[in-house]
């Protein structure tokens, strides 16, 4: 059974700091997704990583994928309060069903 | 990006009644639609996968008679919660895919059964 594990599950940090969320998965997959969810809202797509070594950046967020290590990271640079949300990674193995991590609840304090 | 519209966004219904939630792909034809359920502060739990014109495939533990899914066209899937009870209260989210690598999510439906 495919498992997707995020670390940490809860993260409280100060504005201006850098931090990384990790996403490990247990089986081969060439597709890795990152989503953001605000309270009471649905998912917002952040990044789609489609190959080993893929790196994508949008504003203060940067995601990378290492398919050999089965690891993706979401790096936050100089965090701002607006980035407070829950972040999910998800993997799409051959079965064509997204498998989600547990989510990382990020709180950024002024 | 592609747009998936889900309605209603919120619904309150009485115990024992049925509720229908619609999921529409507005600017693309969805080959596959997915229905998720999300409990508070938890991740998304896949309930079922539906392809246009065929029966939905339900995940283990999901009651197909309780959660009826119809995928009548390439742009519309519906989830009907039949004989709803308070324990069915949850946040339901649909998503749709087509030929590309991305899944597009609806806005979600907050169901409260009283």
Image: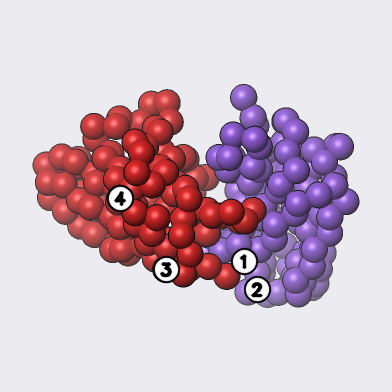
Chain colours: A purple, B red
Q: Position of residue A26 (x, y in %)?
A: 72, 30
Q: CA distance from mark 2 to mark 3?
A: 33 Å
Marked residue chain, label 3: B
Q: Secondary structure at mark 3?
A: loop
Q: Secondary structure at mark 1?
A: loop
Residue A84's label in the rendered image is 1
Image height check: is A44 above or below A91? below
Residue A81's label in the rendered image is 2
Which of the two discs, 4 and 3, sits closer to the camera? 4
Marked residue chain, label 2: A
The reply to whether discs 2 and 1 touch (Cβ–Cβ < 8 Å) is yes
Q: CA distance from mark 2 to mark 4?
A: 43 Å
Relative to A72, is A4 on the left or the right? left
Residue drawn at x 64%, y 53% is: B101
Nearer-N-terminus badge (4/3): 3
Marked residue chain, label 4: B
Which of the two discs, 1 and 4, sits closer to the camera? 4
* Quarter of image, res A74: bottom right
- Pick the front one: A24 or B53: B53
The residue at which mark 4 appears reads as B72
Q: CA distance from mark 2 to mark 1?
A: 6 Å
Q: Position of residue B80 (x, y in %)?
A: 24, 46
Residue drawn at x 58%, y 40% is: A96
Image height check: is B22 above or below B87? below
């Amino acid at each position: 059974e495919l498992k997707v594990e995020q670390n940490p599950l809860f993260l409280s940090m100060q504005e201006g700091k850098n931090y990384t969320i990790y996403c490990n998965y247990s089986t081969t997959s060439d597709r890795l997704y990152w989503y953001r969810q605000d309270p009471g809202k649905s998912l917002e797509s952040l990044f789609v990583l489609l190959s080993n070594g893929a790196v994508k950046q949008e504003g203060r967020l940067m995601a990378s994928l290492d398919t050999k290590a089965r690891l993706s990271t979401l790096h936050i640079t100089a965090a701002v309060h607006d980035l407070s949300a829950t972040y999910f990674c998800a993997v799409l193995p051959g079965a064509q069903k997204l498998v989600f991590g547990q989510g990382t609840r990020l709180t950024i304090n002024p | 990006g592609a747009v998936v519209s889900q309605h209603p966004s919120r619904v309150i219904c009485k115990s024992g009644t049925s509720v229908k939630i619609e999921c529409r792909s507005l600017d693309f034809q969805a080959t596959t639609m997915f229905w998720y359920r999300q409990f508070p502060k938890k991740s998304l739990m896949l309930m079922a996968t539906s392809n246009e014109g065929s029966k939905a495939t339900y995940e283990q533990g999901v009651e197909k008679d309780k959660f009826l899914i119809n995928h009548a066209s390439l742009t519309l899937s519906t989830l009907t919660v039949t004989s709803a009870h308070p324990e069915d209260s949850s946040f339901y989210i649909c998503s749709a895919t087509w030929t590309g690598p991305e899944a597009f999510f609806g806005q979600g439906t907050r169901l409260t059964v009283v």
